[in-house]
Amino acid sequence: MNIEIRPALPSDVTAIFHVRTAVTENALTMAELTKMGITAQSVTDMIAAGPCAWVAVGGDGVIGFAMIDAVEGALFAAFVLPSHEGRGIGRRLVELAERQLFERHPLCWLETGKATRAAGFYRRLGWSNEQDLGNGDIRLEKRRAPGQGLGR
C-alpha cells in the first residue's frame, strides 16, 4: 500500500479524531479529550494557524497523524491506527514533526507514559534525557543535530 504523508487540512479533523480514539495504548474517548480542551474546533484552529500537523493517508483514508506545538517546541501527538502499526508510518510522521520543530528550536520535547510502547518507540528514535513527571508519565527530549534546522 502506498502511504502519502501530507500537511493536515481542516477537513482531516474528523479522521484525526477517529485515529486518536481508535488506538489501544493511551486510549481516550471524545469526552475525555474534550475535558482536556482537545476539541474539533481547537484542532481545526491549530491546523489553520500554521504547519503543525501531518496525516498519513493510505487506501483507507487517514491512517495516522502527528501534531506539534511549534511555539513550545513539543511533539504534541503521534498516532497510527492499530491496523497499520509496524509499517514505519509513525516513524515517518515523527521525523517530519521533528524537522519542523528543529526549524525553530534546538531542543524539542514530548510527554508519554513511562511503561508504554510509545516510550520505547521514541527512545529508539533518539529521544532521551528522561525526566519523571509523576503518575507514570515522563518527559523525553531530543536535540537538533549540528547543521539540522535553521535555529530561528
Image (cartoon, grey):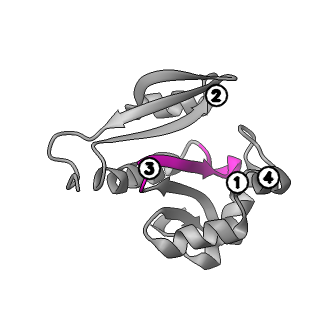
Do the residues bearing badges 4 and 2 touch, measured as CB atoms within 8 Å?
Answer: no
Distance between the alpha carbons at the discs numbered 4 and 1? 15 Å
Amino acid found under the numbered disc labelled 1? Arg
Let me know if residue 77 is in the magenta part: yes
The residue labelled by disc 3 is 72
Do the residues bearing badges 3 and 1 touch, measured as CB atoms within 8 Å?
Answer: no
The residue labelled by disc 4 is 35
Left or right: residue 71 versus residue 61 is left
Left or right: residue 104 versus residue 58 is left
Amino acid found under the numbered disc labelled 4? Lys
Q: Give the range drawn in magenta.
A: 71-85
Identified at 78% across, 46% down, the residue is 28
Around disc 2, counting alpha carbons within 10 Å, would you say few (fewer than 14), some (14 to 19), or many (20 or more)?
few
Left or right: residue 27 versus residue 11 is right
Instruction: Indicate the secondary structure of the residue bearing disc 4.
Output: helix
Q: Mark 4 or mark 1, which is nearer to you? A: 4
- Give the position of the N terminus as an image quadrant: bottom right
Distance between the alpha carbons at the discs numbered 4 and 3? 21 Å
Around disc 3, counting alpha carbons within 10 Å, would you say few (fewer than 14), some (14 to 19), or many (20 or more)?
few
The residue labelled by disc 2 is 116
Amino acid found under the numbered disc labelled 2? Thr
Distance between the alpha carbons at the discs numbered 2 and 3? 24 Å
Label count reads 4
Q: Which of marks 2 and 3 is nearer the N terminus?
A: 3
The residue labelled by disc 1 is 20
Q: Position of residue 110 (x, y in %)?
A: 50, 39
Q: Mark 3 or mark 1, which is nearer to you? A: 3
Around disc 4, counting alpha carbons within 10 Å, would you say few (fewer than 14), some (14 to 19), or many (20 or more)?
few
User: Is residue 44 shown above or below 125?
Assistant: below
